[in-house]
Image: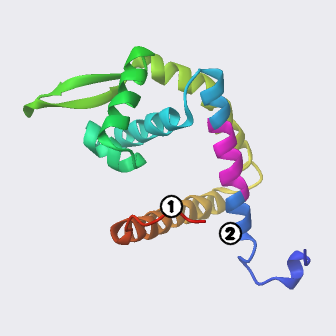
Amino acid sequence: MPSTTDQPPGARVPLLVQRLSYELTRFSHLFARHHALHPTDVEALAHLHQASLRGQVMTPGRLADAIDLSPPATSALLRRLEASGHVERVPDPADGRRHLLALTDTARQVASGFFGPLAGALRASLVDLDDAEVAVVERWLASAADGAGRLADRIADTDRPGPPHA
């Protein structure tokens, strides 16, 4: 690999993000294994957590769309998460015919206990940066996540089922 001085600024960013993504995925899979969950279960819990942080309601249908599962597979996933005490379905106060999904306090405690040290390690990686540099990192991460999300949405909007790849 060429030295970093031979590369234009930002050239290593995609590879570093890929490396970070790999480590975060590995951490998520370890959480799944330690708590007898499927990785898709953990992905669903993460979507519920993010929706909660944003003040958004999550329904079974929205969750199915978010994690690209069929309605029957989503129902099975929700039964597993309810049985394990991680998720509860609560009646929608605005529409009694539908249910909203919520993380239980137990799920929040279990996740906090496991992912808290990861959050600490990520914060510790910023220790050598001043406040202005941390602000740049935060802006870049938000912008990169937004850009990746828009690209994924665009691909999903044009995605057509086809034959499996050989």
The residue shown at (33%, 68%) is 157
Q: Residues within 10 Å of mark 1 (few under 14, many from 20)?
A: few
Of 88 and 141, the residue lying toward us: 88
Identify the amino acid type marked 1. Answer: Ala
The structure residue drawn at horizontal position 42% and vertical position 46%, both measured from the top left corner, is 67
- Asked if the magenta segment contains residue 20, the reply would be yes
Residue 21 percent across, percent down from the top left? 65, 53
* Residue 57 shows in the view: no
Secondary structure at badge 2 equals helix
The percent coordinates of residue 154 (x first, y second) are 38, 71
Pick the front one: 33 or 130: 33
**Residue stretch rendered in magenta on the structure:** 19-28
The prevailing secondary structure element of the residues shown in magenta is helix
Q: Badges 1 and 2: C-beta atoms under 8 Å apart? A: no
118 sits left or right of 165 in the view: right
Image position of 112 (left or right of 57): right
Type of residue at label 2?
Pro
Above or below residue 105? Residue 5 is below
Q: Which of marks 1 and 2 is nearer the N terminus?
A: 2
Do we see residue 129 in this rendering?
yes
Mark 1 = which residue?
145
165 left or right, relative to 104:
right
Task: Compare residues 76 and 115 and report the one nearer the observer.
Answer: 76
Answer with the quarter of the image where residue 146 lies: bottom left
> Is 22 drawn above or below residue 81 in the view shown?
below
* Numbered circle sitting on residue 14: 2
Query: Where's residue 53, x and y in %?
Result: 38, 40
Residue in the picture at 73% in, 66% down: 15
